[in-house]
Image (spheres, rainbow, N blue to C red):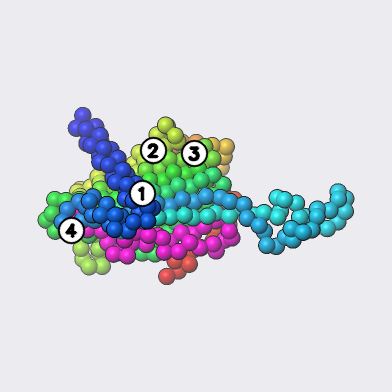
Amino acid sequence: MAGFLMLTTLTRAETDDRRSHRRILAVRDGGNDAAAAAASASVKDGPTGWRAALELRFSARADVNPDVNPDVRPHAPGVSGGDSSPDKRRVRQTVLRHRHVGPLRIQKALYPEGQDCCHAVMIHPPGGIACSDHLCVDVQVEANSHGLILTPAATKWYGAFGSSEQASQTIALDVQGVLEWLPAETIVFDQARVRSLIDMNIGPQGQMFGWDQLIFGRRGCDESFETGMFDQRMQLQFGPERVWIDRMRLCGSDPLFQSPLGFSGCDSCQTAWMVTSASDPVTDDLLDAARQTHPDIAFSRIHPRVLVMRSLASASILRSRFERLWHWVRPRWIRRQPHTPRLWAT
């Protein structure tokens, strides 16, 4: 019963976070920067806390294909020549619209694979999240659009240094098209107090590949996660059907960090998930091939459309391991060859 009450309380808090986020963005859209600043200040969590909100919308539109001459009429059947039919004269383009309040924004929208796939680089200039700060990200991927979201650097949850206040983030993903959610790792500093929610709603033809890498402490500085609290919930649903809830609640020096049933002495873990369209479920052949090709990753098909992948290792090993996994999965998942983001080479 206590666990149920705790979940209910978090759900109410998350709802309040989303309402505050939308209110801030609505004021910002009105063009009154002073009002936007006042709205942002009005939802501060404390004397040093702030809220940053970012909303992204990927949508598809047809655009003129510059490689086809629109003045050329289609050839008659049986007559050789180029195809200038209406379908060939237009190409699909994914358009990104975004708005923000606070230090969370899109640095750049890139099209290295062509106009139908938009790579969005999301940045958080302060570089870290301190106690009583809150980040809210809202992503909508409309039908026939394709978005790929990256971050150039790790997310850092700083120590609270004796404060009882929490830092938090709420990430809401509404996917009707194709979304690849590929942020850099998350580092949880000693004494950090964190609450995180990743909420995914996938439509019947929506498809998604995402991952979440967590690093506890900083071994390079001989720092472990000795005190603090990390509370994260990831949930995925198809409309009203909730198919996956992944809850991680760890305290500093938690026995699970050393337990063979937990982290087995590792400081880093990574979870990835692949969601297919309703018409193209995860097959036994794909699951068997994935397990044979990537023996260091555990695969679980928790729903005909959902494949969950997990692994434990050092941070650098996990990063390269899951990048290889993404390269392998992508052509089998959305029939598209991988295009390695340039950020991964930096």
> Which is nearer the eye, 147 or 103?
103
Label 2 crowding class (10 Å Cα cut-off): few <14, some 14-19, many 20+? some
Q: Please indicate, yes or no, whether residue 292 appears anywhere in the rendered image.
A: no
Contact (Cβ within 8 Å) of mark 2 with mark 1: no
Kindly report which numbered mark, 4 or 2, lies closer to the viewer in this rendering: 4
Residue at figure coordinates x 31%, y 61% from the top left: 103
Q: Earlier in the sequence, mark 3 or mark 2?
A: 3
Which label belongs to residue 78? none
Q: CA distance from mark 4 to mark 2?
A: 35 Å
Kindly report which numbered mark, 3 or 2, lies closer to the viewer in this rendering: 3
Kindly report which numbered mark, 2 or 1, lies closer to the viewer in this rendering: 1
Q: Earlier in the sequence, mark 2 or mark 1?
A: 1
Q: Amino acid at mark 2?
A: Trp
Q: CA distance from mark 3 to mark 4?
A: 39 Å
- The spot of residue 315 in percent (x, y) is 34, 60
Give the position of the C terminus as an image quadrant: bottom left
> Which is nearer the eye, 261 or 61?
61
* Residue receiving disc 1: 26
Is 128 drawn above or below residue 7 in the view shown? below
Q: Amino acid at mark 4?
A: Thr
* Residue receiving disc 3: 203
Which label belongs to residue 48? 4
Q: Amino acid at mark 3?
A: Gly
Kindly report which numbered mark, 1 or 3, lies closer to the viewer in this rendering: 1
Q: Which residues are magenta?
A: 103-132
* Residue receiving disc 2: 244
Residue at figure coordinates x 26%, y 67% from the top left: 220
